[in-house]
Amino acid sequence: MKVLIIGGVAAGPKTASRLKRIMPGAEITIIDRDNLISYGGCGIPYYVSGDISDEKELRNTSFHMTRDEKFFARAKGVEVLTRLEATAIDRKAKTVRVKNLDSGGERDLDYDKLVLTTGARAHVLPVAGADLPGVYTVSDLHKAIAIKEDLARGRVARAVVIGGGAIGIEMAEAFADLWGAETSLIEFMDQLLPNLLDRPMALMLKNAMERNGVNIHTGEGVKEIIADNDGRAAKVVTDQHSIDCDIVIMAAGVRPRDGLARDAGLLTSPRGGIVINERMQTSDPDIYAAGDCLELSHLVTGRKGYAPMGSLANRQGRVVADNIAGLARRFPGYVGSFIMKAFDVCVGATGLTFRAAKTDGLNADFVITAQSDRAHFFPEQTVIPLQMVFDRDSRRVVGLQGFGPMGDGILARIDAACGLIARGATIDEFSNLEMAYAPPFATALDALNATANAADNKAADRLRYVSVEDFMAWMDDMDSRPDWIALDIRHPVEAEPFVKKFGDHWLAIPYIEMRERWAELPTDKELLIICDAGTRSYEIQCLLDSRPEPFRSLVLGGGFNCIRRIGVPWWPQS
Amino acid sequence: MKVLIIGGVAAGPKTASRLKRIMPGAEITIIDRDNLISYGGCGIPYYVSGDISDEKELRNTSFHMTRDEKFFARAKGVEVLTRLEATAIDRKAKTVRVKNLDSGGERDLDYDKLVLTTGARAHVLPVAGADLPGVYTVSDLHKAIAIKEDLARGRVARAVVIGGGAIGIEMAEAFADLWGAETSLIEFMDQLLPNLLDRPMALMLKNAMERNGVNIHTGEGVKEIIADNDGRAAKVVTDQHSIDCDIVIMAAGVRPRDGLARDAGLLTSPRGGIVINERMQTSDPDIYAAGDCLELSHLVTGRKGYAPMGSLANRQGRVVADNIAGLARRFPGYVGSFIMKAFDVCVGATGLTFRAAKTDGLNADFVITAQSDRAHFFPEQTVIPLQMVFDRDSRRVVGLQGFGPMGDGILARIDAACGLIARGATIDEFSNLEMAYAPPFATALDALNATANAADNKAADRLRYVSVEDFMAWMDDMDSRPDWIALDIRHPVEAEPFVKKFGDHWLAIPYIEMRERWAELPTDKELLIICDAGTRSYEIQCLLDSRPEPFRSLVLGGGFNCIRRIGVPWWPQS
């Protein structure tokens, strides 16, 4: 059997290697336009930053061999032809027209099974100057090498990154952290990672980036990139600013490379992406596809979407190989797990954001907590805000987001949730989820369990929130809601500067005294109950609800632990 | 409604606090024999070690208040009566006979609902000298304080810990690490953590303990503890050694405290433990129970078992409270998640060990891998051996174990698996499990995915193992299996010292040359294929299986990455 694979970065080599093992008689050929293949594209920002010194490390195996054409031939028994572009598929003849990008020569390669792993291309904003020298996408290793050469030559004192997605943020860190460049990041939407995080977590991330010296411009559209006298990109003009720079990174997302498939008459999505079934077959059963060129099903919404992730590509490649070899395997879809480092913090998410869940038509709700990542008596514990999104009707948990210091603590909670969310687990299952416990690793009731418990309380309306956004808007203009008053139940030492600064808007009664002093509270105001994590505030909300007096109260979910991480201008100086 | 709770450490206070919030009108009383309540018992080893300076920290809330009687009264509206022992339950009259341990006075407390959270007692081995001064269990805070006082007075230069479970190991670390005591640990079974780990992981743990200076005696039974002239414990005699010491820690497990329940005619298990239903009710519907005094259902085997864990106690307490308040909640059982720190390493597990799965009657099998915890090109990556246990008939994954450096990397994999194992997920689901990926956190195909892929190959007999135990036995006596020969496919520089040392038993052909040189291999020997992680070995096994020659081969699962962590005397000096 002849298997031809178009695309040699992630899904292609994975398909080829697995297939050769389980079907040793197959003749497998990978073709790629590039001369550099089978690399860890997600590592590019770390190569640019200098964490990884040589681009070869991105192409090496864990046992230090470089995955080039020779390696695939010798080690895997797989033929790799580089600098060869597939220009057309003849499905009847079962041939692919290929063009040698060096010689220009063309020929046909025949196949019994064809695998399309054509990947994605970087989206370039349609603005003037986007094609100037000094404007780079992060689309392949050659670009990465060129960027790093610019850095190494000392050419880059000021960098502008366009796009507040994961790659944009990682690139901004690469410039600012190890190279010390003055770095600005521009995002058209009103927050970082708009598709992956809800606003509170995005604001924490933004604050961490700013604390590390990156200028973040959210809600700004790029209008133009202007050249200097040498014709190099030297200024990025937005609808609000004009930012001088020595380099521009265009990280405005990627689009599936589905043109070859579409031209061959294979089913592709109107939104882009090759359409496949759960066996990874295209509309032609002899043609499979995997990786960033696909449209995929979302496991929570059941809708079609796009998830260009190296991790999915690798999992899919194996499923393709199995199906070609006659082992019936399925790839049912994606849930959207994600994690990233940004300087000294990390953010992660899986499933749907609250915004996405609402848009999807769910009766969506969420909670935010700010619990310790390990036993609060353990010396190195820290707070990790978590946000859980759920459907009030079915009690199904549909999403989880987390923010914490660099380390694997957020990873643990996201990974614990991803499989359960994909399976439709409810709040109750998360409440009892038996995560491993010892004081150096977790709290007896893990932060994720506690978050599910908060969701249970919110679903029952025992816990009622003022949103972080509404609270912050009120703090900016307290007269906007004259019927609101803060009820600060923290330790008097913590509350005192706030009482001093905000006067009549700020009532302070310590948590421990509330059962004795609740009668002091006004019934004509809505009480915004504030503590560090939100947990004590909920207790006080329960207490007030049990009084005959008609107290009205809202809890600041995640409390000041979250607000501090977001960073606010009104915080009193102590 | 009057709710009486017997036991004030973990499940009791949790039940009380939750119940008071959702049923504010309830009159809730907790009684406890001790004067110290509501503490983090799992933190005791860290208090003894000095990581935690004051025992009060174990009794404090995260907001630095001490959880004593006054705190529960003021903050929670819950009455706590200490130094009060429950001696009998009159289920008809709905009263509990209690005795004041200071005054000796007795009285009856009445209840509408009773909650038994009586916990566990330390098992004391029936050996002479077990009651000597200087022999301590780790059963409560008073014992912990006494141990630490001995340490602080400089009395402890040599410590013996009896019991190789989690608490024994943590206590051994506490003595050896920060106090620098010469520490020995004695375990009757032939490995550490016999109920939680299979042998390879237990050997890695043992090696790490020994590397950190703890003398480990597995497979040794304690015969006697002998006093010095002052009558203090001074020597522990086993069936093989006699070990001088200044202190003895008896950490030989715990038993459920179910006597009160049994005497009241409630159903208890012949193996110990109060019998409950999924609503946490005992055989008397007005009496609930939670925590270490219970018998629980195992979610994988469906059998009854015992899981004394503070984390379960907290989750159960909430379920009890909900059911008393009329919110129907279930606690279906436990899967057995566990994690612990031991010096600079950590081990974790969830579900069944291979041994337990076999005993349970499953058609059990397992794989061991030794993959990187993060992208192999990322500077701080390290290898994390994982063992996955599965049922060959159903392809269900029934257990996972992991070993790694201290940090949350093992936690992430255990937590990712625990919920899915409880739900009966198959190998295929783990293969596609969408764990979050970025190079600083994971590999594109996470180590857990890769382990599931190995399980898939093993289930199909494409991957066939020599067990770590058999391999090590052969290394100790190569003549025992004259038909075995090592096929070392690592880099020649790595293989060379082995060829030198083991001569005819050791064949070295580099991985990359195998497709050219396989014909050199003997067909009259069973080839034990060896690499670092086991991954390349599997590739070569596939290659050899595809040849017409009748090669016989076995893969060393986890490769030398595992062997190195186990530590072996025969490793060649370089």
Image: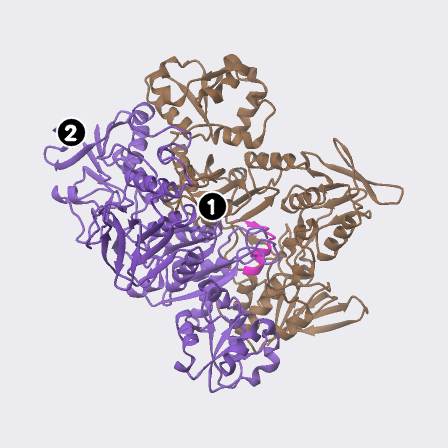
Chain colours: A brown, B purple
* Residue on which disc 2 sits: B109
Q: Are marks 2 and 1 on the same chain?
A: no
Span highlighted in magenta in the image: A303-315
Residue A311: say if magenta. Answer: yes
Local SS, label 1:
helix
Among the 4 quarters of the image, the one containing residue A33: bottom right
Instruction: Using the image as rendered, state which of residue B357 and residue B382 is in the foreground.
Output: B382
Could you give the CA–CA distance between mark 2 and mark 1, rounded to whole angstroms? 43 Å
Residue B529: say if magenta. Answer: no
Q: Position of residue A520 (x, y in %)?
A: 39, 13
Instruction: Using the image as rendered, state which of residue A520 and residue A32 is in the foreground.
Output: A520
| Label 2 CA crowd tier, 10 Å (few <14, some 14–19, many 20+) | some
* Residue on which disc 1 sits: A413
Task: Identify the subunit bearing mark 1.
Answer: A
Q: Which marked residue is nearer to the observer: mark 2 or mark 1?
A: 2
Instruction: Using the image as rendered, state which of residue B365 and residue B157 is in the foreground.
Output: B157
Note whether B82 is above or below B236 in the view shown: above
